[in-house]
Image: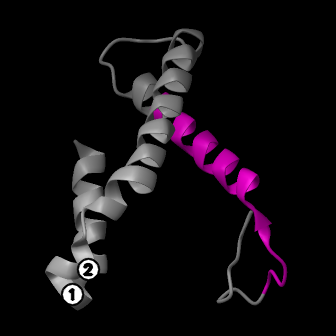
Amino acid sequence: MTVRFPAMSLTPGAVPTSFVRGALSSGSIAIFFLIYWWLPNGPTSPRKVLPAAIGAGIFWEVVKYFYFSFLLPHLKYGEIYGPFSLSVTLVRTNLESVM
């Protein structure tokens, strides 16, 4: 399975889905690492923070996959909001992502 970017003229081919998922997972882990490393008031070592960041990042990706694959198709935003369903979906996804 591949993800295609028709609007991007620089990449004429397709990007493998595994590469995209790996990049997103790595980004999630990096964000959690930076939050856990910089946010505490006291000094923390990266060696203590890394296992928690990896666990949180993997858990985040699993929950995100479950939400987009199984829950979101059953919410029927298109029937309720009509042409505004995309914007409502994005706002709700961001709201739930922050919580």
Q: Magenta segment, which residues?
A: 10-33
- Determine the residue positioned at 68% across, 56% down: 20
Q: Are marks 1 and 2 in contact (CB under 8 Å)?
A: yes
Looking at the image, residue 5 lies above or below residue 59: below
Farthest residue to the right: give it. Answer: 13
For residue 36: magenta? Answer: no
Three-letter amino acid code of the residue under disc 1: Gly
The C terminus, quarter of image: top left
For residue 12: magenta? Answer: yes
Q: Is residue 90 left or right of residue 32?
A: left
Q: Which residue is mark 2?
A: 78
Q: Nearer the viewer, residue 39 or 61?
A: 61
Q: Is residue 31 visible?
A: no
Q: Is residue 32 left or right of residue 4?
A: left
Q: Nearer the viewer, residue 92 or 11?
A: 92
- Determine the residue positioned at 29% across, 60% down: 74
- Determine the residue positioned at 50% across, 40% down: 61
Q: How far apart in space, not on screen, are marks 1 and 2 (Cα)? A: 5 Å
The N terminus, quarter of image: bottom right
Looking at the image, residue 10 lies above or below residue 69: below
Which mark, by number, is residue 35? none
Which mark, by number, is residue 82? 1
Q: Secondary structure at mark 1?
A: helix
x%, y% of residue 94?
A: 29, 57
Q: Is residue 96 visible?
A: yes
- The quadrant where residue 91 appears: bottom left
